Image: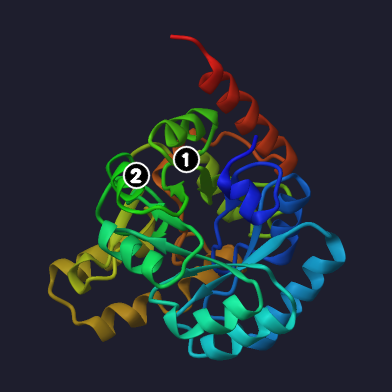
C-alpha cells in the first residue's frame, strides 16, 4: 500500500508503532520495522545514554527504518536530539512540547520530524515549523491525552494542513485502519495493541491486564491539574481520583504517581503502578507476534477499503 507516509518513511505499510515510555524498547521497535511498519523507540524520561544504547541495539536487529519518540519535557531532550543525529536515525516523533529548537539540526541531517498533536491549532503550528507529517491523536488513546476524539480530530486536521496526517487513538484492527483512511489519514499510529505483542518486553502482569480489560475499564486521571492521563483502572487510579476530588495539590498527586509506570511495566505491580492503555484494550484478546498483528490489520483494512458499497 502506497501513501505519502510510506514514501516519506521508506516503509511497506502505513503503520507506525506508538513511542510508549518504558514499553517501546528496541526489541519491539525492531520487530515492528521488520514486519513492514515503522518501529519507534520511546525515549520517555530516559537519559541520552540509554537512548543511544537502544538505537544501537535496534540497528543490530534490523536494517529497516525505525524512529525515536522524544518527550520534549525530558531534562536531557537536548542531548537526545543530538544522539538521534549522531546515530543516523531518520525519523523522530515528538510529544509534550514544540520541537522547533531542534528542527534546523534535524532537517540538516535529513531526519523526518512527525509531532504528535491533539488540536488543529498545534497541527498548523507544526506544519509552519517544518514538520514532515503530524500524528493527530484522539482522546481514546492511552497515556497523556487531549480532549477531542479521533473521529472528530482527524478530519479537521486533514482539512487544516497540507502535510500527511497519521491517525491515532482507538485503532486496534483493520476496521480502525480503514476508518482512519476514510477520514483522510494516510497512516495510523497504534500503541495499545503492540503492548501485547510477543516481542514487547513489558511484564506479563501488564499484558494480562490489557488483555482482560473491558470497554469501560479505562480511567482518566490528572484532569484537575491539566495533565490528563488514560490508564486502566486499578488501586492507584482510584486513590488518585479520590485525592483529586478532595482537592489535593499537584505535588501530592505527583508523589502518588512518581515511578508508577515503571512499577507496572518492569516490576509487574498492576495494583499500585500505572497501566497506560487506550480505550480499545477491550478489543485485544491475545498476545501475538508483531508480524501477525500487522498482517491482520492490513488484510482486514484493505478488504474494507476495497469493498464496494
Q: Nearer the viewer, residue 137 or 305?
A: 305
Q: Nearer the viewer, residue 83 or 45?
A: 83
Graded by Cα atoms within 10 Å as few (under 14), some (14 to 19) or many (20 or more), the crowding at tag 2 reads: many
The residue carrying mark 1 is 171
Q: Nearer the viewer, residue 130 or 175?
A: 130
Q: Residue at x 51, y 34 (%)?
A: 177
Q: Is residue 98 above or below residue 67?
A: below
Judging from the image, what secondary structure is the residue with disc 1 in? loop
Q: Position of residue 255 (x, y in %)?
A: 35, 82
Judging from the image, what secondary structure is the residue with disc 2 in? helix
In the displayed orientation, state which residue is furthest to the top: 309
Q: Is residue 131 visible?
A: yes
Q: Residue at x 42, y 42 (%)?
A: 170
Residues at discs 2 and 1 in contact (Cβ within 8 Å): yes
Q: Is residue 21 above or below residue 87?
A: above
Q: Position of residue 243 (x, y in %)?
A: 21, 71
Quadrant of the snapshot with the C terminus: top left
The residue carrying mark 2 is 150
In the displayed orientation, state which residue is furthest to the right: 60
Q: Is residue 306 above or below residue 13?
A: above
Count of numbered labels shown in the rendering: 2
Q: Is residue 47 visible?
A: no
Q: Residue at x 62, y 36 (%)?
A: 286
Q: Is residue 236 above or below residue 225?
A: above
**Residue 22 placement, left or right of 134:** right
Q: Position of residue 70 (x, y in %)?
A: 53, 74
C-alpha span from label 2 to label 1: 9 Å
**Residue 178 placement, left or right of 88:** left
Q: Position of residue 188 (x, y in %)?
A: 51, 45
Q: Quadrant of residue 92?
A: bottom right
Amino acid at each position: 500500500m502506497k501513501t505519502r507516509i510510506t514514501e516519506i518513511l521508506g516503509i511497506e505499510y502505513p503503520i507506525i508503532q506508538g513511542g510508549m515510555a518504558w514499553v517501546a524498547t528496541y526489541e519491539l521497535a525492531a520487530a515492528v520495522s521488520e514486519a513492514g511498519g515503522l518501529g519507534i523507540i520511546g525515549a520517555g524520561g530516559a537519559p541520552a545514554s540509554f537512548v543511544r544504547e537502544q538505537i544501537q541495539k535496534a540497528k543490530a536487529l534490523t536494517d529497516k527504518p525505525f524512529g525515536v519518540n522524544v518527550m520534549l519535557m525530558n531534562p536531557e531532550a537536548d542531548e537526545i536530539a543530538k544522539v538521534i543525529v549522531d546515530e543516523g536515525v531518520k525519523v523522530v516523533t515528538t510529544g509534550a512540547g514544540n520541537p522547533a529548537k531542534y528542527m534546523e539540526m534535524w532537517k540538516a541531517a535529513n531526519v523526518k520530524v512527525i509531532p504528535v498533536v491533539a488540536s488543529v491549532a498545534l497541527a498548523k503550528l507544526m506544519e509552519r515549523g517544518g514538520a514532515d507529517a503530524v500524528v493527530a491523536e484522539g482522546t481514546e488513546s492511552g497515556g497523556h491525552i487531549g480532549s477531542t476524539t479521533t473521529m472528530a480530530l482527524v478530519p479537521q486536521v486533514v482539512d487544516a494542513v497540507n502535510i500527511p496526517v497519521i491517525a491515532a487513538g482507538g485503532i486496534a484492527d483493520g476496521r480502525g485502519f480503514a476508518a482512519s483512511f476514510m477520514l483522510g489519514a494516510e497512516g495510523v499510529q497504534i500503541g495499545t495493541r503492540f503492548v501485547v505483542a510477543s516481542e514487547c518486553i513489558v511484564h506479563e502482569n501488564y499484558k494480562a491486564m490489557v488483555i482482560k480489560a473491558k470497554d469501560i475499564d479505562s480511567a482518566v486521571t490528572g484532569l484537575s491539574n491539566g495533565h490528563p492521563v488514560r490508564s486502566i483502572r486499578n488501586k492507584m487510579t482510584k486513590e488518585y481520583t479520590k485525592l483529586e476530588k478532595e482537592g489535593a495539590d499537584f505535588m501530592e498527586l505527583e508523589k502518588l504517581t512518581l515511578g508508577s509506570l515503571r512499577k507496572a511495566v518492569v516490576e509487574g505491580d498492576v495494583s499500585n503502578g500505572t497501566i497506560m492503555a487506550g480505550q480499545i484494550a477491550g478489543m485485544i484478546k491475545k498476545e501475538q507476534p508483531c508480524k501477525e498483528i500487522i498482517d491482520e490489520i492490513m488484510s482486514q483494512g484493505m478488504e474494507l477499503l476495497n469493498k464496494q458499497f
